[in-house]
Image (cartoon, helix red, strand yellow):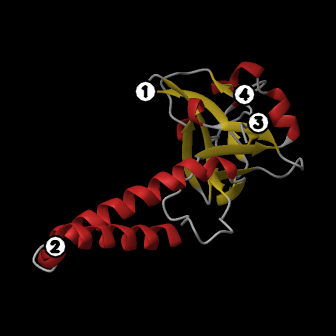
Amino acid sequence: MYIFILSILVVSFISLCFFKKKFWENRYLVLLITASVAIVVTLSTNFITRNKLGTTNENIVKKEIQLISFNPSLIDSTFFISNNKDLGLSEHNYKKDSTTKPVTSHYLFYYDNGGLKLGYATNGTWRYQYLSKIYIAPSTDEKVAYYTKVKKIYNERSSKWVSSISLPRIKTIKCFYLPPSEYAAIPDSLIRKIPI
């Protein structure tokens, strides 16, 4: 923050020396130049020094995933992958009037609009994520499954010379934590390891 203030003072002093008696007449130009230089200097300093800061991971969303009953004739119950590429997630749901016994899982892989999706339910609502945009990991308990969004951010600066305002988040990832038995059933080709 001090760099921002110092750059304003230095540019104002240089402008005063340059314009002399016409300083007040050119005050808007001086203000524009001063603000521009101060912002550029502050942003440049931030981006040059940000690699020396550590990083932390912060959970911004955490939702519990519900157990879903599926019609066994529509899915491959070994991997919980849909057998029918024309059906959406809700159409795989087990109907109570059926004579077959349902299979249960926290997720279902299915195809829709040309992409492989991971379908799930939270708070009674059907949801999905494209498999190419998510990560999958085992949870700590056989009964626990949840979805998280984690953002990787730079640590706060301890110095008051540079502001942390312009530091962007490094990345945001979406991750599914599935019970260990369900995680073990997923083929390795479909699992993307968490990068952070």
- Earlier residue among tags 3 and 2: 2
Q: Of circles 1 and 3, which is in front?
A: 1
Q: Which residue is mark 4?
A: 191
Q: Is residue 91 above or below residue 54?
A: above
Q: Which residue is mark 2?
A: 28
Amino acid type at image mark 1: Asn
Q: Which mark is residue 52?
A: none
Q: Which mark is residue 113?
A: 1
Local packing at callout 4 (Cα closer than 10 Å; few below 14, some 14-19, many 20+) is: some
Q: Of circles 3 and 2, which is in front?
A: 2
Q: In whole angstroms, how far apart are the C-alphas of marks 2 and 1?
A: 55 Å
Q: Which residue is mark 3?
A: 101
**Helix, strand or loop under label 2:** helix
Residue pictured at 79% horizontal, 24% vertical: 78
Return the x and y of residue 115 as percentages of the image width and height: 50, 25
Local packing at callout 3 (Cα closer than 10 Å; few below 14, some 14-19, many 20+) is: some
